[in-house]
Image (cartoon, rainbow, N blue to C red):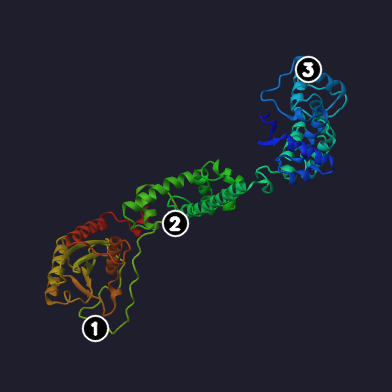
Amino acid sequence: MKTLKGGIFMSRKLIDLDLLQSVFNNYENGMSFESIVEIVDVNLSPEYLRYMYNRYLTNGLYSLIRNSQNNKYSFQFKMNVVQEYLDNDISYKKLAIKYNIPAHETVRKWVNRYTGRKENTNYSPKQEVYTMKGKTTTFKERLIIVEYYLDNEISYKDCAKKYDVSYGQLYQWVQKYKSHGRDGLQDGRGKGKPKSILTPEEQREAEIQELKDRNKILEMENKVLKKISRNRKRDDKSTSKKIAAYETIEALRNEFPIKHLCQTLNISRASYYKWLHRKPTQKEFENKILIKEIKHIYEKYKGIYGYRRIYIYIRLYLHKKVNHKRVYRLMNQLNLKAVIRRKRKRYKPCTPQTIAENELNREFQEREANKKWLTDVTEFQLENGSKIYLSAIYDLGTGKIVSHYLGNSNNNQLVFKTFDKAVKTVTSTEGIIFHSDRGFQYTSRLFKNKLNHHKMIQSMSRVGKCIDNGPMEGVWGIIKSEIYRGSKRFKFESIEEAFQVINKYIKFFNNERITLKMANLA
């Protein structure tokens, strides 16, 4: 742009004509443009200075001053320039210098308009450089082509034709070379500018961006690890590592590139897309329904059923034929386990001292009702430190609790009331074996008289042989483990809550609870 003081703007910096004249004088005295650029404060590349020098030789120094407005050329002037190009095959650059046209691209546009961007191709069987596809080249090849173009001052067309590259490629290479030198010809696709041509500010921005990208990768890896860990622990999904990986990618695909997620999880993108577009099999569809039913049964009975009882429930009440191994496998996937009571300590054997003989003699197999009754007393703790006691009579034949009674103290009345309730449930008690441990209530004369009155046969466990009353001990273990739900420190908040929960559970125990004996009915 022309200035009031006779200067020109080049690369957004004001260059005085006197300075430019000094540059040309130094070049004529033997200095190279590369050396002049390093010594003189001129923000121009050596290649562009060479081009300006050629214009200076042809049209003088003042031909380098751009007008404040766009140059206006007559139609006839344009036609003369175009005709000379077509007749003599002079390069655009030489024509621009000859006719003092600031940019040789202006000449190229005139020629393209005149020819309609159609050139005669009779002279060469090669594809026209304007329409041919770009050619893959190396850095060394690009450097040779650009240097040849600048040193010989030929047209883009001729140079492109010589090296069999497209016109557009050559033009871009030359512009990059003028702006950034040799580094501008490096292949920076997807990498940005070469670091050697970055300004200090651009270098800082590049370093900040690199740190951001690194943080993004670390964030992705962190989220992937958390997500895949949760997916493997999901209560409705398979624990397969690959399935968990696929689900993790699906969940994070909107936040991070799928390519990077697959690399982090060490799986191929092809396998992920194959999984994404898969169709569920019939077995997967059936398992999905079965999983819902298993969860419903488990939650309905508050976790007291394991896979065996849930298997029986499904066959007995839902009338579905399933294998117990399938139920076991699905419950493992759901991480559902029944409440398991703690193992009881073993007691050392001792010499038996009997008050009544062990008439039961561990013959626990019984199919008829009201043939063998077992009894015992157990305790439950409250949060205030006190206890309540449960006395119950269990029928080996039916597997049900005949009667039970709750009280605040473990005394004779607790046992007597339980016994009186039990005998009222049957028409005849004659011959029933009534088995108990050697608790003080059962060894009293009053209780012995009650048994004799009802013509029942008293049986007692031997000293230190709690297994003699094993089924009754098992009933206590079931009741406590299923009420406590595996908690070792369970305590009732109040007596009222304890009475309500225990009475409700014994009703469930007698009428609803699934037992393994029911498997024969399924």
Element assignment for label 3: helix
In contact (CB < 8 Å): disc 2 and disc 3:
no
Q: Residue furthest top?
A: 76
The numbered mark, 2 or 3, whose residue comes first in the sequence reads 3
| x 80%, y 31%: residue | 56
Report crowding for label 2: few under 14, some 14 to 19, many 20 or more residues within 10 A (C-alpha): some
- Left or right: where 166 falls relative to 260: right
Element assignment for label 1: loop
Q: Which mark is residue 77?
A: 3
Element assignment for label 2: helix
Name which quarter of the figure residue 17 lies in: top right
Q: Residue furthest bottom?
A: 351
Q: Amino acid at mark 1?
A: Gln
Q: In whole angstroms, how far apart are the C-alphas of marks 2 and 3?
A: 90 Å
Is 408 drawn above or below residue 321 in the view shown? below
Count of numbered labels shown in the rendering: 3
Asked whether residue 115 is in view, the answer is: yes
- Left or right: where 401 falls relative to 270: left
Q: Amino acid at mark 3?
A: Phe
Residue linked to disc 2: 332
Residue 384 image point, x, y percent: 19, 67
Q: Quadrant of the N terminus?
A: top right
Residue 106 image point, x, y percent: 74, 25
Q: Which mark is residue 353?
A: 1
Q: In whole angstroms, how far apart are the C-alphas of marks 3 and 1?
A: 137 Å
